[in-house]
Image: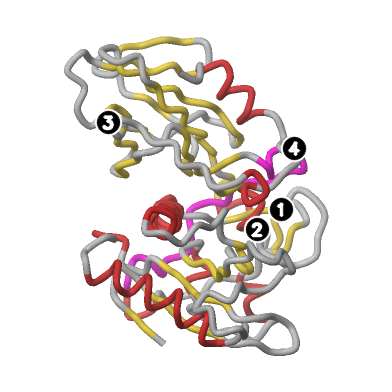
Amino acid sequence: MITFRARLITILTALVLSSSALGWNDDRLSVPVMVNGHIIPYPEFAIFVMPGTPISAGFVDSGGGASVRWANQVMNHSSRQLVAPDNPGLEVLEITDHATGESCVISVFTMVPAANVGKNGRLNGYRIGRYPDEPLRGLDIYLPPNGFVEVTSKNRHTKVSPNFTLGEFVSKQESGYPKYVVLRSSLLLKLENILATLNLQGYPTDGFVIMSGYRTPFYNRAIGNVQYSRHVWGGAADVFINNSPIDGKMDDLNKDGKVNRADARWLADFIENMYEQGSFGPRVGGVGVYGSNSAHGPFVHIDVRGTRARW
């Protein structure tokens, strides 16, 4: 069993290899944990919280009880409510099942409040831009984010789920560090679910290439995308599979000897079949199919908007 110390070292040490280079990580807990309403079946994951906000954490079903290790302090999960640090940054939370000895490590990213974004639309020099004044159709998921995760050259390799790192989701705009990102844990859970299902159903892949994750409103506007793109709220990723050959483009998924939009359609159809079988629960969302152009190869858009959308 991997010890807490070993996982802690892994999380806090900048990884020099991407998750795809390491191969698909299929580690699972025998009993999942629930953290802030998310059921997490993995021994490592990440959540994103505002300073000083409550955190609920524990195993879904632990007959022997569970304990939580937060920095150097050990407490019984039921004795006191956990609270996020007052200062933005990365802290590590360990949840241990007393009955099995199994543990889960949660990277807790305390965000920088959105109120810190200046009138010029910049946060510590990083250009965020401006979110729409009115949410789309009055939906809460289109309200401006409360905060942003600070990404540094040191923490960008931190694993936010078994097969993805924080830096993979940063907006593609050119800038130095620090950068800032909005990322939803529900998107990570959905991507991991699709990746696992591909592998378990006989379509081996090391991982997804995140062609585009979060986009700041500034960058989203600069590339001419629609104002209310789910990328701007950290709930979408444009992905492709690039295993054989590793050439920066989508693989020939439908095995017709060509790489084109049909391969993106194959992946989208696979995801659609998962949706029809009820695989996503509350993490339903959009799936879009895109072909090649002069800037990129085929890819699939995946999001967690909460309603089904296809294009």
Residue corresponding to mark 1: 179
Q: CA distance from mark 4 to mark 3?
A: 32 Å
Asked if the residues shown at circle 3 and circle 1 are in contact, with their CB atoms under 8 angstroms apart, the answer is no
Q: Is residue 279 left or right of residue 300?
A: left
Residue 148, position in %: x, y?
57, 51
Asked if the residues shown at circle 2 and circle 1 are in contact, with their CB atoms under 8 angstroms apart, the answer is yes
Q: Depth check: give the residue in front, 171 or 41.
A: 41
Q: Residues within 10 Å of mark 4 (few under 14, many from 20)?
A: few
Residue corresponding to mark 2: 170
Residue 135, position in %: x, y?
40, 74
Relative height, residue 106 to residue 256 (above, below): above
Q: Residue at x 56, y 16 (%)?
A: 5
The answer to whether residue 49 is visible is no
Q: Depth check: give the residue in front, 254 or 24.
A: 254
Residue 292, position in %: x, y?
65, 87
Q: Is residue 142 magenta?
A: yes
Q: CA distance from mark 4 to mark 1?
A: 12 Å
Q: CA distance from mark 2 to mark 1?
A: 8 Å
Q: Residue at x 55, y 87 (%)?
A: 261
Residue corresponding to mark 4: 154
Residues rendered magenta in the picture: 139-157
Residue 31 circle label: 3
Residue 35 circle label: none
